[in-house]
Amino acid sequence: MTAHRQTKQLEAIRTAFQTAERPLSIEELHELATRDVGTLGLRTVYRAVRRLEEEGEIARVLVPGDSDRYELASVASKHHHHFHCTACDRYFDVHGCPGGLNKIIPNGFKLEHHDLTLSGLCSSCA
Ligand SMILES: [Zn+2]
Ligand SMILES: [Zn+2]
């Protein structure tokens, strides 16, 4: 694989994140990047994603019981939450945070981190 071709593939994946503006799975990245640069193997997308993750450009969004999603590190670094559409299985960013979670933890516990995934139907599926 030429360096030029590889650069184009990485660029297509970056563009996919910028266009979608939501966490993406490998399969979704594959679909979006293929539209951009033409035929692209799923393994190539895996490799490109691993490289971008190693270089700290993208971050993994852990999804219990399903394949991981990825988001841009610049998005991941800002505190936010996710919405999972149970119909189309897509993940979306939720920019607010309810906060106040200190009020519901057991007495004497110290809250250090929280993760919140809302689920339901997205606007296209509702
Ligand atoms: Zn949906
Ligand atoms: Zn929060």
Image (cartoon, rainbow, N blue to C red):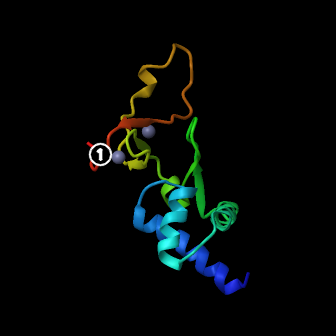
Towards the viewer: 10 or 112: 10
Residue at (70% x, 61% y) in the render: 54
Residue with the mark numbered 1? 125
Q: State whether label 1 is within 8 Å of ligand 1.
A: yes
Q: Residue 119's x, y, as percent?
A: 39, 36
Residue at (56% x, 24% y) in the render: 110
| Quarter placement of the N terminus | bottom right
Which amino acid, by three-letter code, is at mark 1?
Answer: Cys
| Quarter placement of the C terminus | top left
**31 horizontally vs 122: left or right:** right
**60 horizontally vs 121: left or right:** right
Towards the viewer: 102 or 82: 82
Q: Quadrant of residue 111?
A: top right
**Secondary structure type for disc 1:** loop
- Disc 1 residue crowd, few under 14, some 14–19, many 20+, Cα 10 Å: few
Residue at (55% x, 41% y) in the render: 63
Q: Residue 58's x, y, as percent?
A: 58, 60
Towards the viewer: 33 or 115: 33
Q: Quadrant of residue 48?
A: bottom right
Q: Residue 79's x, y, as percent?
A: 46, 47
**41 horizontally vs 104: left or right:** right
